[in-house]
Image (spheres, rainbow, N blue to C red):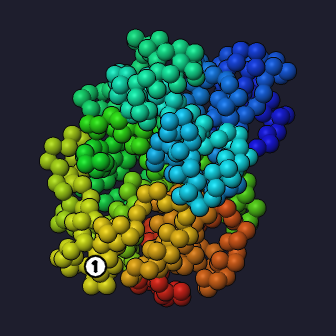
Amino acid sequence: MQLDIKTCSRARLTRDPRFDGRFFIGVMTTGIYCRPICPARPPKEENVRYFPTAAAAAEAGLRPCLRCRPESSPGTPAWLGTSTTVSRALRLISESNLEPEDGKDGGMEALAARLGIGSRHLRRLFLQHLGASPITVAQTRRIHFAKKLLDESRLPMRDIALAAGFGSIRRFNATFLKTYGRSPSRLRKPNGRDGMMGEDEYGFQLRFRPPYDWDSLLAFLAPRATPGIEAVENGAYRRTFLLHGHAGWLEVTCNAAASGLDLHVHYPQPQHLFLIIERVRRMFDLTADPEIIAAHLRRDPLLNGRVATKPGLRVPGCWDGFELAVRAILGQQVTVRGATTLAGRLVREFGTPLPDVKVASGLTHLFPAPQQLADANLSRIGLPRARAHSIRSLACAVCEGKLSFAGVADVEVFSKRLCELPGIGSWTAQYIAMRVLSEPDAFPAGDLGLLRAVGLKHVRELESHAEAWRPWRAYAAMYLWQVNPKKGVSSHDYVLHKNGKSARPAVGGRR
């Protein structure tokens, strides 16, 4: 990547928080790399070098700064919108360890194969867009997470190594010594912050790049919160979850003063904390760069005022792809409130009760697994026959391995497979791509709320107009849905399709 030297220089000298995570500063005289907001005395310009990612600085042989803690910066957004292959590769990396096998890049070979390209080409793409190889990117993420656990928890070293994705304590210690020049035990502060707040409870702070419209995100999630599974109240989002056979719950609140979200996790298996945090980061779109997105969308007069009204609007993700897909089917041809009512019935009838959950009242169940819905009699919750069939077909496809929401390497292929299921069409597939796969250019053009917001009558007209919004059409959809809605009703309360397949809007829809 090419960085603008003058811009980087001004940002580091003024410690501008808007550039935190956009680039890193290598101090060549000390051999360390820092965030633009590092409180240390700024070095002379001739002694610094700028890197697009922390992994690029690590690949150049530099060590992370112990004062500004690069592991605490927002995710680097440089790849967003520039390379679809790189963005999908990073999503796959976040779902696996990508650990080299016997000193070879076996992990990278497997990653490239899943993406349908050669490992050399994948390496070239990563060097072009991120300044580092896939292996270095994965390893930097792991070591940064390990450092975060050292600073914010009292976990034993073995648990930290496992949580960060290292196969052994020996490998963990060797990588840590190489990266920081010190052993993990020497870096752990005896009186540092303790993120473990009780048995199996952990606290973390996840940084974002301001502005961040937390209130609008909660306003989107609140009416869609599945009773028994999720709750949005008093400025907090809470939910239960099942991961690798173990139940847990989490709570997320916004700490605007620190430009971060405070995450509280209750879960009995610390080795899965990295996966939990990665999922939460995607759920709340923490790697987005709102200024880049806003600058692009504001070129269109239709969006300019909306972007100015709500700066920092994010695309909300989800915890589990199957759960979100079921919810999307439940929402066909009914209002958001109606879909939430159906989802609550589904959970009470087929979900797994959790009588011992130690969290605010209202979180009582785990969402039904595909196996529980594959043969379920969904008419018991008042669901129309066609939508019941769609949910059962989706559940069967997941159970039989024909469809998986994890490790999706090609969004287009995945969407086509979704649309082969009865009752799932383009609208549903694009909505799932937005919220499950964090695809920034996904766009459910057939949504009646979007058509009304732009004052158009035909889907093709909207698709043509939306071409100028690429590669941020998902964000454009959020602005059209959430800004200036019909009084008292979000524009997304309108549902276009009876079964997700219609190409023409149903006049009025159901409310």
Looking at the rendering, which quadrant does residue 46 occupy? top right
Look at 29% across and 81% down and name the residue there.
389
Task: Tell me the quadrant of the picture where the C terminus can be found.
Answer: bottom left
Query: Mark 1 falls on what kind of element?
Result: helix
Looking at the rendering, which quadrant does residue 164 occupy? top left
State the residue in front, 511 or 318.
Answer: 318
Does the image show residue 34? yes
Residue 362: percent from left, percent from top:
23, 51
Q: Check the image and report above or below for 269 versus 414.
A: above
Residue 2: percent from left, percent from top:
80, 42
Residue 207: percent from left, percent from top:
53, 36
Q: Residue furthest left?
A: 355
Look at 65% across and 78% down and name the residue there.
462
Amino acid on which disc 1 is placed: Ala
Does the image show residue 491? no
Task: Tell me the quadrant of the picture where the N terminus can be found.
Answer: top right
| Residue at numbered disc 1 | 388
State the residue in front, 144 or 41.
Answer: 144
Q: Residues within 10 Å of mark 1 (few under 14, many from 20)?
A: many
State the residue in front, 482 or 292.
Answer: 292
Look at 57% across and 42% down and name the residue there.
105
Residue 254: percent from left, percent from top:
46, 39
